[in-house]
Structure formats: structure tokens, C-alpha cells
Amino acid sequence: MSQGLLRGMAFIDFPNITSSGMGLGIRRLNFAGLAKVLTSDTTPVGCAAYIADIGSRQELFRELDRSGLKVEAVSPGKSVDGRLIFDLIVGAYRDFYDVGILASGDRDYVRVVQEAKRLKKTIWVASFSSSIAHSLKSCADKFIDLDKYVSEISFQMYPTICVDCRKSIEVPFKPISGRPVYCRDCYKKHPKTKSI
Ligand SMILES: [Zn+2]
């Protein structure tokens, strides 16, 4: 994928993308892959994932951090959309980007997309085709259909069995024979091995 001259900044509505991805059978998103898909054809200047209440999900936080994404954790009770809208519009006013890439299918973003376009920004919207609001898709300068990138933005899951409790589980790596794999609960008793 080539890098263009336009500065691309991506804003990922994490709850929206993960729940619509689940609907398509995506069990585990590959965040680095998603960031790459969103900002391809631009010179990436930032990619942030907006998440509610990360306190209880430190594992997720670490994974996002490793993917090179900026994580914007919204306090419990506060709206993820509100924070994302704020950053997208401030970024437009202050000229932090040329292309704002919004990853969400939620029609609540229509007004902010229109506003950013009034500020002469190009706005692309990325979503799964089954969960994109028509009004959002039609006001975007380009629609990135995530259905076409499922292999890039998700990890392949492999079915296996927890060696402790014998429960059927799925893991994002190919289990190697002789190497025990545990479910999330049993993993807590074996912290040095791989879990789901
Ligand atoms: Zn188990």
C-alpha cells in the first residue's frame, strides 16, 4: 500500500467496531491491522481507539498499546462518541490532519462529519457493510468496507481444549503439541503460559 501526501488520522469507535465485528464472527480484532487498513493511502499521523471504562480491561489496554494505537479511555458513564467527536472536530479546526478516518457505523456522527467537511477536511468512514448507517455512509467522502479486510483486521482463531478443565476454547495462535493451553479461568493458576 502506498503512502500519499495527505495526513491521515484515524478515530476508532471501539465499542461500535467490536460489536459489529462480532456479528460477522470476528472474535478478536487485529488492531495493528485495522490501523493499517484505515490509514492506507495517507501518511498516518495518528490512530486512536476510543474505549469506555478500561479499568477492568488492562489486558486489552496492553494489547492496544502494543499495536501502536493511542488509547483514549473514557471514564465510566461518559460517552465514547462525545470524546471522539471532540477530538475529530478539534483536529479539523487545528489542522492536525487532512483526512479524518472514522471507524464506526453510527449515524450519530453525521453532524460532525458534515462539520469537518465544512472545515475543508476529507472524511472517510469505515465500517462493516451490515452495520453502516446509510446517512453516515452518504455524507462521507469515501466508504471503507471492512467486510473486504476481515483477514487483515482479525486474528484467526483455533479451536482447542483447556488442559485443566477440558472446556472447549478458541485461541488466536496455533496450539503446539506438548505446550499446554488454558482457558481464561485456569490461566490465572498458570501465569507463565498462554491463554485465550
Ligand atoms: Zn480451564
Image: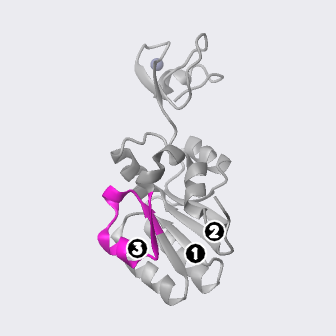
Q: Residue at x 43, y 75 (%)?
A: 140
**Cα distance, mark 1 to mark 2?**
8 Å
Residue type at mark 3 is: Tyr
Mark whose residue sits in front, 1 or 3: 1
**Above or below — where is 190 with respect to 1?**
above
Q: Reading the chain from its start, which is encountered first: label 1 or label 3?
A: 1
Q: Which mark is residue 99?
A: 1
Q: Which residues are magenta?
A: 125-145
Between 185 and 117, the one nearer to me in the picture: 117
Mark whose residue sits in front, 3 or 2: 2
Q: Label 2, on which residue?
A: 42
Identify the image's colour scheme: rainbow, by chain, secondary structure or one colour: one colour
In the rendered image, residue 95, in percent from the top left (x then y), is placed at: 64, 83
Badge 1 vs badge 3, beta-carbon distance below 8 Å: no
Badge 1 vs badge 2, beta-carbon distance below 8 Å: yes
Q: Label 3, on which residue?
A: 109
